[in-house]
Amino acid sequence: MSNNFSRSTDTTQLEDPELIDLTTITGSFKRHWLVLLGCIIIALIVAVVLKFSIAPQWEASATIQIGQLPINPTTLIEPTAQAAERFKQRQLQDRALAAVGLPLNEDSDERTRLFRKTLKAIPGKNTDFVDLSVVGLSQADAKNNLNSAVQALISAHNVRLAPMVKNLNDRIEVNTSAMLQATTEKARLEASLKNATNTPSGARFEPSVVAISALTKQDDLIRGLTNEQSVLIDLHTKTDSFPTMLVDAIFVPAKPYFPKLSIFLTIGLILGAIAGMAIALFLDRDHRKTSP
């Protein structure tokens, strides 16, 4: 049994030099700290060079409010989630790109490619708002690109609203005409009754029951037309007051959205440290094998 224990101990001692423990790794880093430091410095320099070699990009952001249809109860022109999805459609993007004079083929122009790639819309939860953002190669490009996308959506909503607004205007026109006729007829009936009471025979007879009944019906008709007119005008006002629109001005920060020096330096530091540690361990491989 003692022989078996001795053989096991000897085997473990023989294998120990091949194991890379924390102490060995730390020792390698200490012996080759100049290599580790050099790799980190080189990586940071490369990161800075890369940062300034990449064209800066600015991000524009805005919030839009989806308009309302001229109907009761209050209904949005389209749900916010559907409006957000509309910004992914090529048709809307093409309309926005054409508005700012950019080619539609993203393979021929970097600005077009960047527009299609970065245009994003996030619908608000339980609200009629949609948050938008897009990236451009300058502050002006980012702002103009986002504004053109917003206007493209507004145009699409106006096209959808047009027949409903026309129908509403026609109904208001018919109501106004009917109201004019009803008030004219009421005035005629009132004048007839007044003239009847002023005649010698009118002094001996009560006003005609038929005429009074007709006047009452005209009052009911005018009341109904007035209520209808109020509803129609309210719907028209709602459409005019709550169209699809920008809630606030488009915001573009003064500093570029990308690239950020802090991110590049962090990545350079990590990659430089990893490369330095790998080289230190590689250079120290013979030392680990020969160490007792």
Image: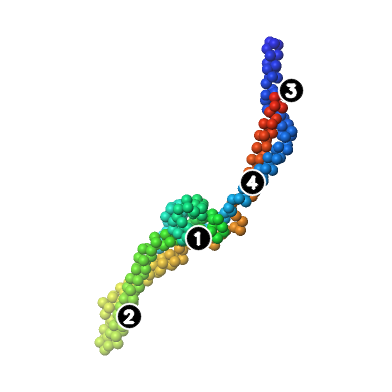
Q: Residue at x 57, y 55 (%)?
A: 58
> Disc 2 versus disc 4: distance between alpha carbons?
88 Å
Q: Which mark is residue 187?
A: 2
Q: Residues within 10 Å of mark 2 (few under 14, many from 20)?
A: some
**Mark 3, residue position:** 292
Going from N to C along the chain, the mark reached first, 3 or 1, is: 1
**Mark 4, residue position:** 47
> Disc 4 versus disc 3: distance between alpha carbons?
41 Å
Instruction: Please state which of the two labelled residues, at mark 4 or mark 3, is closer to the viewer.
Output: 4
Instruction: Please state which of the two labelled residues, at mark 4 or mark 1, is closer to the viewer.
Output: 4
Quarter of the image where the C terminus is located:
top right
Q: Is residue 259 left or right of residue 69?
A: right
> Disc 1 versus disc 2: distance between alpha carbons?
55 Å
Please say if 49 is above or below 277: below
Viewer-side residue, 222 vs 272: 272
Q: Secondary structure at mark 4?
A: helix
Q: Secondary structure at mark 2?
A: helix
Q: Residue at x 73, y 24 (%)?
A: 291
Pointers 2 and 4 in contact (C-beta within 8 Å): no
Instruction: Please state which of the two labelled residues, at mark 1 or mark 2, is closer to the viewer.
Output: 1
